[in-house]
Every structure is written in structure tokens, then in C-alpha cells.
Amino acid sequence: MSAGHNHAQVRAGHERKLWIALCLTSSFMIAEVIGAFVTGSLALLSDAAHMMTDALALAIALVAIQVAKRPADRRRTFGYARFEILAAAFNALLLFAVAFYILYEAWQRLQAPAEIQSTGMLVIALLGLIVNLISMRLLSSASDESLNVKGAYLEVWSDMLGSVGVIIAALVIMLTGWGWVDSVVAAAIGFWVLPRTWTLLKESMNVLLQGVPHGVDIDQVEQGIRSVHGVEDVHDLHIWALTSGKNVLSAHLVAAPASGSEQQVLSLVTQLLHEQFGISHVTLQVESAGFHHDEHDDVHA
């Protein structure tokens, strides 16, 4: 079906954008880490830490896409697409660790403020902001289609905000000499990242636990199936996602008397699920009215 071809094209587009973003991020990462230690800025170190996790997240995302390309086999009958979700969950856990580390360091710095070289801090933060804006532009459209890319996009997004915070902190320190602003901005970056990271982790866990995919209303799906001519009832309805944008459905259908052939009912329901709900991988068992479903064989679509 064409849906599979389109999905492959989308993944290929994701891969190209991720490679470009990884090259940009990695090329600046080393300079920002060194600059953080030279200037003594914790806010810049926070931004540098996020830049490092950006690079790691992008690399993991690329590895996940490569693994997901592997075809299904006798041991992995659904293929390796879910590795992408594992990568997204790992990225979320990594972000949590970085955020808590920065919060801890900010608390320590508030107890014993350090001298900050605000000019170098400002220059490095401005360069980091430019790199993040380019990477965000590359990943923004693909982030709505893949949790894996969304994880990388969220890391770049949080790092971009971190760069803005560092720029503001550097300007304040230059004008007032208030070194404590550096720690406050670092803590603010950490608090900003946490709720978005929780959202990413929650979405990833929903996929891993085979929950109903985000954006799918199971009641509407059931009503749609019941509205198909020849369907008298539907039960044992399950909807889950193998990975982002690849939803799966299984259900038992009770065919109405004189509804025509089972294949015709299957065809109508399958077409409805694909066109209205974007679910292309469907397994249906059709039963005749008045008989228990265990007494009949499965018919697949």
C-alpha cells in the first residue's frame, strides 16, 4: 500500500535532518564546554550540558532509525520499529538526569558564588543560540511525526531557551555585577526542561505499554466500525502503536444476518479504518450473529 511508501519517505527525511543537526551541534559542543569552564559560568555549563545531551540524543535517534529499518524476522514479527520509542524514553531519562544535576549545582553556587567572565559567556551563548535555531528549524516539522525526533527536538528547544537565558544573565552580570543571576538562570533552565521531559516520557511509556495512541479516540473508532453496513456488533477491540505514526488494531466483528460475504464486511471496515483513522495494520475476526466467537476461525485483513 502507498501508506508504507510514504512512511519510508518520512523516515528518510527525518534521517537527513537529524544528520545535519548532529553535525551542527557536535561542531559547537566542544567549544561551548571549554568556554563554560574558562568563563566559570554555571548557566553556560548548563547550556553546554544540554548541548552535549542534544548531540547524544541526535546520535541515538539516528541509531534508532537505522535499527528500525531492519525487516521483520521469525523472532521479531513486527520488526524493530519500537526501538525508536526506547530511544525516546532513554532521551527523556537523560534529560531528567541533566536537569537535576544543574539544579543541584545551582544550589551549591548560590551558597558560594563564583567569579563570572560575562563577556566570554555572552559571546559563546550567542553562537550557541544560532546553532540551536538552525537545528530547531530542521527538526520542527518532523517532531510531530516521530516521538524519536520529538525527543531530539525537545532537547534542542530546551537548549535554545537555555542560550537565551545565558545571554540575559551575561548582560545582567555585565551591567550590575550580580553573579548570583548566573545560578538563578541555570536553575530556571532546569525547571523549564522538567515538565516537557515528563510529557515525552509519558508518551513513550504509553507506546511501550500498548496504550491507545495519542490522538486516537477509541470510542469514535468503535462507533465508526458499528456504522459499517453488515456489522451488527464489535468487541475485543484493541488499538496500540508499534511506533510513532504506525498504529495497529485488532477486533472481533459480529456480522449481521444477510449482510453478504465476510470478505465484503472486512473490506468495508478496513477501508474505513484506513481512510478515517489512519490505521492500516488491521486484524479482524468475523463471526456470524448468534454464535460464540470461539467457535469460528479468524479471518484477517
Image (tube, rainbow, N blue to C red):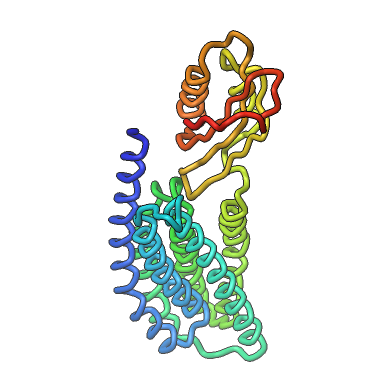
Q: Is 108 above or below relative to 90?
A: below
Residue 96 in sight here: yes
User: Residue 118: horizontal and vertical position, in percent?
Assistant: 45, 81
User: Residue 272: horizontal and vertical position, in percent?
Assistant: 50, 23
Near-viewer residue (50 or 186): 50
At 34% from the left edge and 80% from the top edge, which residue is drawn? 31
At 47% from the left edge and 63% from the top edge, which residue is drawn? 87
Task: Residue at the far front: name it.
Answer: 295
Q: Is residue 272 left or right of residue 62?
A: right
At 46% from the left edge and 29% from the top edge, which residue is drawn? 274
User: Residue 61: horizontal and vertical position, in percent?
Assistant: 40, 62
At 61% from the left edge and 18% from the top edge, which residue is drawn? 255
Near-viewer residue (178 or 7): 7
Near-viewer residue (56 or 252): 252
Q: Is 266 above or below relative to 35?
A: above
Q: Quadrant of the N terminus?
A: top left
User: Residue 220: horizontal and vertical position, in percent?
Assistant: 62, 27
How many numbered marks does the figure carry?
A: 0
Q: Quadrant of residue 180?
A: bottom right
Q: Quadrant of residue 52?
A: bottom left
Q: Is 29 above or below relative to 86?
A: below
Residue 199 in sight here: no
